Amino acid sequence: QTVGFVLGITASLVAAIIFYVLVESRSRELSLYVNPTKTTIVKSGQSSDLHVVYKGQSISTDVTALQVAIWNAGKESIRPEHVISPTVTLATSPRVPILEARIRHVSRPVINIALDTAHLADGSIGVSWKILEHSDGAVIQIILAGPSTVSIRPAGEVEGQRGIKLVADSTKEWRVIPFSVVGFLWTFALPIVMLRLAKAFPRSWKAPLFSLIYVLFFVGAIWVLEWLFRGNGVPFRFD
């Protein structure tokens, strides 16, 4: 039984690696990260000799500058034909006018990433590109007529992906310890405990229990592989 258990665990691990390499790792994952560090250029209601005029009209609200990063966190490239929605847009939330939007950094010039600024007054910009391979993307600076509480939300659909991923944190360091503990318990400790408990059950129960152990190990191995090899960090630095 011990030999069979070891062989089963080994087979599950190999299957998990093959599944991850052939299926999970070959995915598209268009992601957006909003840098929480924002700059208030003009604060409304305060005495100042600085006045902002946008298209001939004076701006009486706060003026805030922020930066966002948009990139492909998946291993499969994203081309224009993979965008199944009319376009990929970034919009202010709540809706306030965008005064200016420009690209600050790009991963590679050949990706030809560009902005459609036709709807700035509506608080929306379009983003297009020639190709986004793994970690390809750009940092976009947005100056908007609103307070620093205004954020940016993505909209659009990419083939094989349900909505654009909004990354909540640019790093995953704070999750390393709890994930390592849970991953170890799920992948190794739980099957061992279940193996010991299986000795107390009748022989007719052992086959289903061993099957359950293999499934738990398979799921745990996929979980660990997902954590180790799919980076959640933003591949760009902000100014």
Image (cartoon, rainbow, N blue to C red):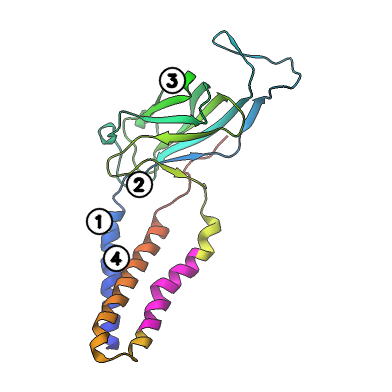
Answer with left or right where residue 175 lies relative to residue 225. Answer: right
Q: Which mark is residue 16?
A: 4
Task: Give the quadrant of the C terminus.
Answer: top right
Q: Earlier in the sequence, mark 3 or mark 1?
A: 1
Give above or below for 50 relative to 77.
above
Residue 185: quarter of image:
bottom left
Q: Are marks 4 and 2 in contact (CB under 8 Å)?
A: no
| Amino acid type of the residue tagged 1 in the rendering | Leu
Answer with left or right where residue 35 lies relative to residue 208. Answer: right
| Amino acid type of the residue tagged 3 in the rendering | Thr
Q: Are marks 4 and 1 in contact (CB under 8 Å)?
A: no
Front one among 191 and 103: 191
Majority secondary structure in the magenta region = helix
Q: CA distance from mark 3 to mark 4?
A: 45 Å
| Amino acid type of the residue tagged 2 in the rendering | Gly
Magenta stretch: includes residue 185: yes
